[in-house]
Structures are given as structure tokens and as C-alpha cells.
């Protein structure tokens, strides 16, 4: 038996959400993709301006019920923006895309019972790139087995 992984289904749902897509289609799993954190330097002031907004989803962990084929999966959504307000707006759109969404089944047979925005730390500066980022935790209830 392979443990069912709802990660891909959530990534796709976030990418396909109209409010998120209006801001960015750069939704990544694990780490930023090529060109995501690129910036332009203003020739007059020398200030950096980030070119892209993007989202990186990472697995925080999972726990399984001992006597039922159920799991709770926790992910972190890192929502990067061109500005602090942009990062927060993107985080709000991502939250709306997954919060309190009920039962659904992926084409691969992954069953998700519900997903929720479980809170975050607000907006800050990414320590590696200096880009504004807003992070929050996503809690997902899912089956541990795939549907045939």
C-alpha cells in the first residue's frame, strides 16, 4: 500500500483558483522555480524591485489515526509578493482557495475530507532573498489509501 498524498491535489487547486491565478500562476512544491525570485534594480535609486509573485508549498508533517485509514497532513504556504501588501493579498487568495473546502477526490484517487487555513505568522521579509513573504499553515484531512 502506498500512503495517499494530498499535496498534488492542493497545489493544483491553488493554481487553478481564479483569484490566485489573477495574481500568479507560479505555484511550486518544495522550493521556488527558476526565475521566481528575480528582481530588477532601479537605475536611479539602486533599489531592488521583485518581478514575480509566487507560492511555495512545503510539507510540515503528517499524523495517522491508529485504527482508521485517516491522516492529517500539515503544509506551509509561503506566499511571495512584490510588496508586503502584495504578499498578503496573495496569501489571502490562497487561503480562500483552500479554507473550509469539503470533500473532494483527485483523478488519482486521493480523497480529501476537508482543508483549512490553520493560521500563520503574517508578513515578513524572506531571510534569503529579502522578498516580502506571508506564510500560513494548511491543515488537510484525508484518507491514507487511494480509491480504486
Image: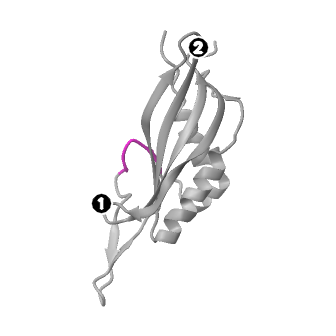
Q: Quadrant of residue 109?
A: top right
Residue 134 on image: x %, y %: 47, 59
Residue 125 on image: x %, y %: 37, 64
Q: Quadrant of residue 104?
A: top right
Residue density around tag 2, few if under 14, some if 14–19, many if 20 or more, within 10 Å: few
Q: Residue at the right extreme?
A: 102
Q: How many marks?
A: 2
Above or below, comparing residue 145 to residue 118 in the picture: above
Is 28 contained in the magenta span?
yes
Location of mark 1 (residue): 127
Real-space CA distance between mark 2 and mark 1, rounded to the nearest whole angstrom: 39 Å
Nearer the observer, 137 or 24: 137
Location of mark 2 (residue): 69
Q: Residue at the bottom extreme?
A: 44
Q: Is residue 35 left or right of residue 70?
A: left
Q: Quadrant of the C terminus?
A: top right
Q: Quadrant of residue 9?
A: top right
Secondary structure beneath dot 1 equals loop
Nearer the observer, 119 or 80: 119
Display coloring: one colour
Residue 69 on image: x %, y %: 58, 14
The boundaries of the magenta stretch are: 27-33
Q: Residue at x 55, y 57 (%)?
A: 91
Amino acid at each position: 500500500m502506498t500512503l495517499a498524498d494530498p499535496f498534488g491535489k492542493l497545489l493544483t487547486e491553488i493554481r487553478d483558483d481564479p483569484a490566485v491565478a489573477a495574481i500568479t500562476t507560479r505555484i511550486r512544491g518544495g522550493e521556488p522555480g527558476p526565475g521566481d525570485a528575480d528582481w530588477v534594480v532601479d537605475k536611479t535609486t539602486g533599489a531592488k524591485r521583485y518581478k514575480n509573485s509566487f507560492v511555495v508549498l512545503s510539507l510540515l508533517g503528517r499524523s495517522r489515526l491508529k485504527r482508521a485509514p485517516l491522516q492529517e497532513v500539515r503544509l506551509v504556504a509561503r506566499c511571495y509578493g512584490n510588496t508586503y501588501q502584495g504578499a498578503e493579498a496573495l496569501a489571502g487568495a490562497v487561503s480562500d482557495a483552500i479554507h473550509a473546502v469539503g470533500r473532494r477526490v483527485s483523478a488519482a484517487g486521493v480523497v480529501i475530507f476537508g482543508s483549512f487555513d490553520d493560521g500563520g505568522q503574517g508578513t515578513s521579509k524572506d531571510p534569503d532573498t529579502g522578498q516580502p513573504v506571508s506564510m500560513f499553515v494548511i491543515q488537510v484531512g484525508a484518507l491514507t489509501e487511494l480509491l480504486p
